[in-house]
C-alpha cells in the first residue's frame, strides 16, 4: 500500500462490496420481479466507484506531495540565493 491510511479505505470499500452482494441476493429472493444480470449491476457500479475513489485518493496524495516538494524547492532556492549573496559580499572589496 502506498499510503499509511490505504488499509482503512480498502476495508471500507470491501465491506461495501460484500454488502452489495448480500443486497443483490436479497433482492433476487424477496422481490418477485427482480432479475439481475449475471454480472450484478450494483456490484459493478460499486466496483467502478471504488476504482474512481481510490484514483482520487491517490491523486490527492500526489497533489499534496507535489505541494510539499515545491515548497522545499522554493526554500532551497532562497537559501542558495542567500548563500550566493553572502559569498559575493565576502569576496567584494571593502568600501573605501
Image (cartoon, rainbow, N blue to C red):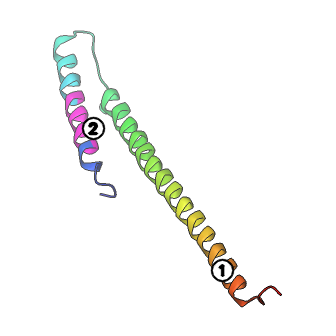
Residue 21 position within the rendered picture, expressed as x and y whole percent measured from the top left: 21, 30
Residue 91 position within the rendered picture, expressed as x and y whole percent measured from the top left: 72, 90
Residue 29 vs residue 22, the one in the foreground? 22
Could you tell me which residue is drawn at 24 percent across and 49 percent down?
7
Q: Is residue 82 left or right of residue 67?
A: right
Q: Is residue 11 magenta?
A: yes
Residue 60 vs residue 14, the one in the foreground? 60
For the N terminus, give its image quadrant: bottom left
Residue placed furthest toward the top: 32
Q: Is residue 22 magenta?
A: no
Tell me if residue 41 comes above or below residue 32 in the rendering: below
Pointer 1 or 2: first along the chain: 2
Give SS at disc 1. Answer: helix
Residue 25 vs residue 4, the one in the foreground? 4
Specify few, some or many for label 1: CA neighbours under 10 Å numbering under 14, 14-19, or 20 or more: few
Q: Is residue 30 left or right of residue 80?
A: left
Give SS at disc 2. Answer: helix
Determine which residue is flagged by label 2: 13
Specify few, some or many for label 2: CA neighbours under 10 Å numbering under 14, 14-19, or 20 or more: some
Could you tell me which residue is drawn at 25 percent across and 32 percent down?
16
Q: Is residue 62 left or right of residue 39?
A: right
Depth check, mark 1 against mark 2: the one in front is 1
Tell me if residue 21 comes above or below residue 64 in the rendering: above
Determine which residue is flagged by label 1: 86
Tell me if residue 23 comes above or below residue 51 in the rendering: above
Q: Magenta segment range?
A: 9-20
Residue 66 position within the rendered picture, expressed as x and y whole percent measured from the top left: 52, 57
Could you tell me which residue is drawn at 32 percent across and 27 percent down?
42
Q: Kindly report the secondary structure that dominates the magenta region of the rendered protein.
A: helix
For the C terminus, give its image quadrant: bottom right
Residue placed furthest toward the front: 96
Amino acid at each position: 500500500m502506498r499510503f499509511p491510511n490505504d488499509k482503512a479505505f480498502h476495508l471500507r470499500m470491501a465491506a461495501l462490496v460484500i454488502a452489495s452482494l448480500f443486497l443483490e441476493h436479497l433482492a433476487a429472493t424477496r422481490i418477485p420481479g427482480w432479475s439481475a444480470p449475471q454480472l450484478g449491476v450494483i456490484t459493478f457500479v460499486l466496483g467502478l466507484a471504488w476504482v474512481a475513489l481510490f484514483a482520487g485518493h491517490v491523486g490527492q496524495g500526489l497533489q499534496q506531495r507535489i505541494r510539499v516538494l515545491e515548497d522545499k524547492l522554493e526554500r532551497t532556492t532562497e537559501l542558495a540565493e542567500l548563500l550566493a549573496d553572502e559569498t559575493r559580499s565576502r569576496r567584494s572589496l571593502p568600501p573605501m
